[in-house]
Amino acid sequence: MKKLPVGISTLKEIIEEGHAYVDKSKFVHNLSERGKYYFLSRPRRFGKSLFIDTLKAAFEADKDLFRGLWLYDNWDWEKRYPVIHISFAEGVLKSRDELDRKIFELIEGHQKRLGVQCRYKDSVSGCFSDLIQRSSEKYALRAVILIDEYDKPILDNIVNPKIAEEMREGLNNLYSVIKGQDANLCFVFLTGVSKFSKVSLFSGLNNLTDITLDAEYSAICGYTEPEMVSVFSERLENKSLEDIRKWYNGYAWLGEKVYNPFSILHYLRAGKFRNYWFETGTPTFLINLLQKNQYYIPDIENIEASETLIGAFDIDFIRPENLLFQAGYLTIAHDRRVAGKIFYKLQYPNMEVKASLSDYILNRYSHDTVLKERTQLRIYQAFQDADPDSLHKIFQSLFSAIPHDWYRKNKLSAYEGYYASVFYCYFTALGLDVTAEDTTSHGRIDMTVKIDNRAYIFEFKVVDIDKTPGTALGQIKQKGYAEKYRAGMAEIYLIGVEFDRDERNIVTFEWEQLQASQ
């Protein structure tokens, strides 16, 4: 049984140390044959660095590493190209001066490795341009440029727009060289987490082919299910593929769905379902943005955004939708064309992301972590016991326990979506089967929770805002929301919850139980 390549991003180590490898080398061939300038955006810890290293090994003609892989018999191994590999993955740069010094260090390393000497010692753009030209001349082959984590210096400073702008200018100074060196370049590939606008970051480099949403390259990073089952078959014995799929599969960029490689490798090593990927990064900036925009959290499941919106990202234009998508918290469910524009339906890729993000958001809404965890256990038990009255008591107590001062600081009493968002986050953080804005032939249910062949249908109202006549429970009954679940569930619970902003709590909690046959 081959070792798991947990945390390894170099092809040489994976192959020579006997680790399992999911062969992505055919993509190397396809890219090199069909174009020259490429850009790819993928979430963190998704295998971008390993693919960059695979490109590097191929262009440097390291043939032995590809023995047994698709590319071995489909590549010209006689040509050894000068490869300039720039990565901003290591460290955190906090100023333009630090960025320029880092770039000079990287360029100097390539000068020594390629055996060339740059003439321009005080100019980032001049030195980089000289490196490309002299490498091409020495090797009598046009150079290859591979840039990994191209956007990290900006993202590391995104909470400080002034520094982020300085980083953007510094990177633009570097990347703008590429277009001018076209005659000396054979292949260029840039990758990172975000997709910044070409105008702001790639001034002059307008010939990049963006393969982020190209169905043909959807599986360039990550594992398809056939790949996972084939490569890790021995480790998957006696494991539920359905559960693994639910937890870690589901990422899609208009093509075949893929598993998160970081999470699946950790799961195969530990044998336990955990939030491996989510634990490697804290989305503080995202949570601040959601709170600033008073985002109705259940709506995260029902975002439909234009191609422009999910593709547009800049220091002065950051929306929750594009950040959620580009950072990997949402993926594409499907697309549709409307009057010449493409719109994408976004959704959580899997249970790991949905539960983890909800739990993280809940930390912001909850003033007491210990209370939050105790509440989660009590909520789960209430569902297990089919006891809506306990849910009422739990949430009544929860809202009562939030100090007045905490409301004042966060202005949550003025946020009408806050109350329903708290319900939603508690339910999804537990990993329950929750559907927000649940579509029926009669309208949309605010929230449905399914557990143990029972469906709980929730309708929420803020009484001093929602002027719709009747009660929340009455609306469930009037709209016939239960019809959707009569055939598939043994029991159905209709729950109407009404809030008052002045009271900052639940003022009405009514419920009825229906049998599926009723």
Image: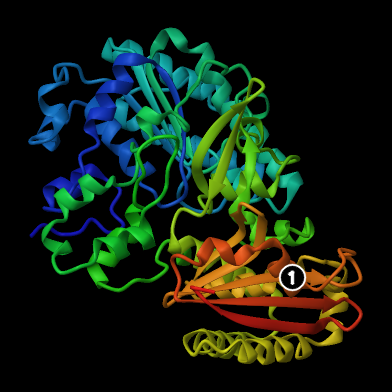
Q: Residues within 10 Å of mark 1 (few under 14, many from 20)?
A: many
* Residue 111 seen from this side: no
Count of labels in the image: 1
Give the residue at x 38% y 42%.
Answer: 48
Q: Quadrant of residue 425?
A: bottom right
Please give left or right for residue 21 compared with residue 341 in the image. Answer: left
Q: Quadrant of the C terminus?
A: bottom right
Image x and y of residue 323, in percent: 62, 47
How was this image coloured?
rainbow
Rendered position, 496 above or below 6: below
Rendered position, 239 above or below 499: above
Q: Which residue is mark 1?
A: 460
Give the residue at x 43% y 66%.
Answer: 488
Rendered position, 155 above or below 279: above
Report the residue that reaches farthest toward the front.
Answer: 518
Q: Disc 1 marks which amino acid?
A: Phe
Q: Camera-side residue: 299 or 289?
A: 299
Q: Secondary structure at mark 1?
A: strand
